[in-house]
Amino acid sequence: MKIIKKLRLQTFWHKYPAIEHKLKTWFFSVNQESWGSLEELKQTFPNAILVDKNSVFFEVLPNSYYLLTVVDFPTQSVCVQNLVRYYINPNYDTSNK
C-alpha cells in the first residue's frame, strides 16, 4: 500500500516520541501490504476499526493512540488523516446510562 501524507505521520512521531517506534512499525508494515478488502486488512491489523466507507482507525497503542486513515483499496493507498488520543477509564460506570 502506498502511504499518502507521510510527512503528517512523521510530525506525529516527532510530537509524541513515546510512540515513534509504534508509528514507524505501522508505516513499514502497511507499506509492505497490498490489501484488496477490509477483511484482508483485518488479517494484518485485527483491531482496525472501520468508521465509515473508507475511514479506518488503526490502534497504535492500545487504549491510548489511534491513527485515523482513509484506505482506498482500488488505488492501494492509505492516507494518514490524524492521530487521536483516546482513553477508556476502567472505573467509568456505564450501568446508569
Image (cartoon, rainbow, N blue to C red):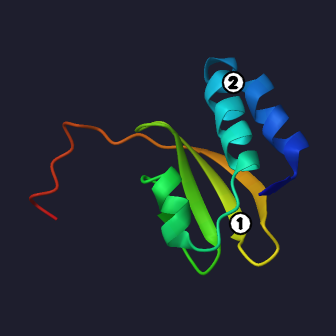
Residue marked by disc 2: 20
Q: Nearer the viewer, residue 83 or 23?
A: 23
Q: Could you tell me which residue is drawn at 21 percent across and 44 percent down?
A: 92
The amino acid at mark 1 is Val
Q: Quadrant of residue 65?
A: top right
Q: Position of residue 94 (x, y in %)?
A: 16, 56
- Give the quadrant of residue 78: bottom right
SS assignment at label 2: helix
Q: Residue visible at 42% across and 37% down? A: 62
Please state the horizontal and vertical placement of residue 13, each as a whole percent of the image.
Answer: 75, 28
Judge whether 43 appears above or below 7 on screen. Answer: below
Q: Is residue 38 shown above or below 90?
A: below
Q: Amino acid at mark 2?
A: Glu
Left or right of residue 97: residue 32 = right
Crowdedness of circle 2 by 10 Å Cα count: few (<14), some, many (20+)? some
Q: In the picture, which quadrant includes the C terminus?
A: bottom left
* Nearer the observer, 16 or 54: 54
Given residues 73 and 57, the one toward you in this image is 73
Q: Which residue is mark 1?
A: 70
Mark 1: which secondary structure? Answer: strand
Is tag 2's residue or tag 1's residue first in the polypeptide sequence? 2
* Residue 93 picture location, percent across and down: 15, 48
96 over 54 or under it: above or below:
above
